[in-house]
Image (cartoon, rainbow, N blue to C red):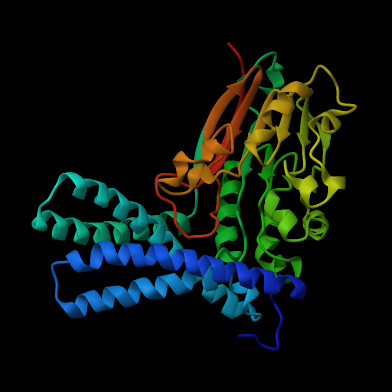
């Protein structure tokens, strides 16, 4: 399952461990696939041939999910990895929906003892899961729409009223998100004509040597005061130091627990950035520190923080920031997982307030894992600062 061209981002000494994990996923996922097949296939109002075909489809999905989504551990040629990740992601997106719908159907069967209902509901689960996956795929692959958000800040200087920040986040450039996708995003961001471009982490899913060509269009982002980037957790899975250097080379300004003072029409704005909330688990020298990010900044200027994860907000509030821009959650990406984000993060999507601090959490500009968005559309965010009234 290997080739001469080693394009896998996984170090050779880690591949056996990832392969063991994939086999565990295969076992657990296989049992879940058996459950779905056992509950649906016998009740379908079709002949044995159709049920056999359905069984083969479910079996293929059971194999594709672990060996597709973890293809980096089993294959080394880039094109093979990308193809397998595509297949595994599509299978995972579809199966996650059919599994939930199957469980909901089983609840109804407790109360409805009717063979006709059993047959029609089994067929409905399959049809609806396919339709949701198709719509989710189209939503994921289209260029993110622009969402405009006004944020009212106390004591905002008149010269900063109307200052615009274009936020993109969670692009996850990798096996399924490539150069063309990023070019479309960059073109739409540049149409905004923002004063600042903010990239709030999870830019990449892979090493510099594999993805530099696909990331390169970000160097064409245009804004009056420049484009800034902070690290997300996926940068630390992909070689953060190399990516930070690459971002600099393409004209982006990384903000690593630091700030810049932006002069805008005679007024000053502090724009700061912190490393990912969990960066210290990979590199203790990158520990996220909102206080350090503000060190030496002017007291009388509004303070905006770029922080990948919303859960940086309590520390940002304590440090004295006025606005935090985050991503990470993808808004849950697709139903029903959007309902579980709050188990880890204080905010799922949109504008919220924590004391004096405003927190805007983007649903993300790309996607991660399954190429699927349902109930959580991707976005490019146009943040407009406004004086509080």
Q: Quadrant of the C terminus?
A: top right
Given residues 93 and 269, the one toward you in this image is 93
In the rendered image, the residue lying farthest to the right is 296
- x, y (%) of residue 277? 72, 41
Identified at 38% across, 66% down, the residue is 33
Residue 150, position as x, y percentages in the image: 55, 26
Instruction: Determine the residue positioned at 27% across, 78% down.
Output: 53
**In this view, which residue lies farthest toward the bottom?**
4
Query: Which of the two residues, 125 or 309, is positioned nearer the viewer here?
Result: 125
Q: Quadrant of residue 204?
A: bottom right
28 sits left or right of 199 in the view: left
Q: Is residue 359 visible?
A: yes
Q: Position of residue 145 (x, y in %)?
A: 48, 46
Image point (22%, 74%), residue name: 51
Residue 153, above or below 144: above
Residue 139: give x, y in percent of width and height.
42, 54
Residue 32: image quadrant is bottom left
Report how many numbered discs are placed on residues in the image: 0
* Residue nearest the viewer, comparing 387 with 303: 303
Q: Is residue 370 left or right of residue 128?
A: right
Q: Tell me, yes or no, if residue 320 can be seen here.
A: no
Which quarter of the image is occupied by the N terminus?
A: bottom right
- In this view, 224 is above or below 86: above
């Amino acid at each position: 399952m290997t080739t001469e061209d080693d394009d896998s981002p996984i170090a050779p000494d880690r591949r056996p461990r990832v392969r063991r994990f994939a086999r565990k996923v295969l076992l657990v996922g296989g049992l879940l696939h058996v459950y779905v097949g056992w509950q649906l296939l016998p009740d379908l109002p079709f002949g044995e041939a159709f049920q056999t075909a359905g069984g083969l489809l479910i079996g293929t999905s059971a194999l594709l999910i672990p060996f597709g989504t973890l293809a980096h551990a089993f294959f080394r040629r880039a094109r093979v990895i990308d193809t397998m990740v595509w297949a595994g992601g599509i299978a995972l997106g579809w199966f996650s929906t059919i599994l939930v719908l199957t469980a909901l159907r089983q609840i109804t069967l407790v109360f409805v003892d009717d063979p006709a209902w059993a047959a029609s509901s089994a067929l409905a689960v399959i049809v609806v899961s396919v339709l949701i996956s198709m719509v989710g795929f189209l939503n994921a692959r289209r260029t993110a729409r622009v969402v405009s958000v006004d944020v009212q800040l106390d004591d905002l200087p008149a010269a900063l009223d109307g200052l615009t920040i274009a936020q993109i986040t969670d692009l996850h450039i990798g096996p399924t998100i490539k150069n063309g996708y990023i070019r479309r995003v960059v073109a739409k961001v540049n149409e905004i004509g923002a004063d600042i471009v903010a990239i709030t982490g999870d830019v990449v899913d892979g090493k510099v040597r594999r993805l530099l060509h696909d990331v390169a269009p970000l160097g064409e982002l245009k804004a009056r005061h420049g484009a800034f980037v902070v690290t997300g957790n996926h940068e630390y899975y992909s070689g953060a130091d190399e990516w930070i250097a690459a971002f600099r080379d393409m004209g982006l300004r990384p903000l690593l627990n630091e700030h810049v003072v932006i002069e805008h029409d005679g007024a000053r704005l502090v724009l700061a950035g912190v490393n990912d909330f969990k960066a210290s688990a990979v590199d203790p020298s990158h520990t996220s520190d909102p206080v350090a990010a503000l060190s030496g900044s002017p007291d009388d200027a509004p303070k905006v923080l770029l922080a990948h994860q919303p859960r940086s907000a309590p520390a940002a509030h304590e440090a004295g920031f006025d606005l935090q821009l985050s991503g990470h959650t993808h808004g849950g990406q697709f139903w029903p997982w959007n309902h579980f984000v709050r188990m880890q993060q204080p905010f799922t999507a949109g504008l919220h307030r924590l004391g004096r601090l405003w927190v805007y959490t983007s649903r993300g500009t790309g996607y991660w894992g399954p190429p699927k968005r349902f109930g959580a559309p991707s976005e490019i965010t146009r943040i407009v600062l406004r004086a509080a009234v």
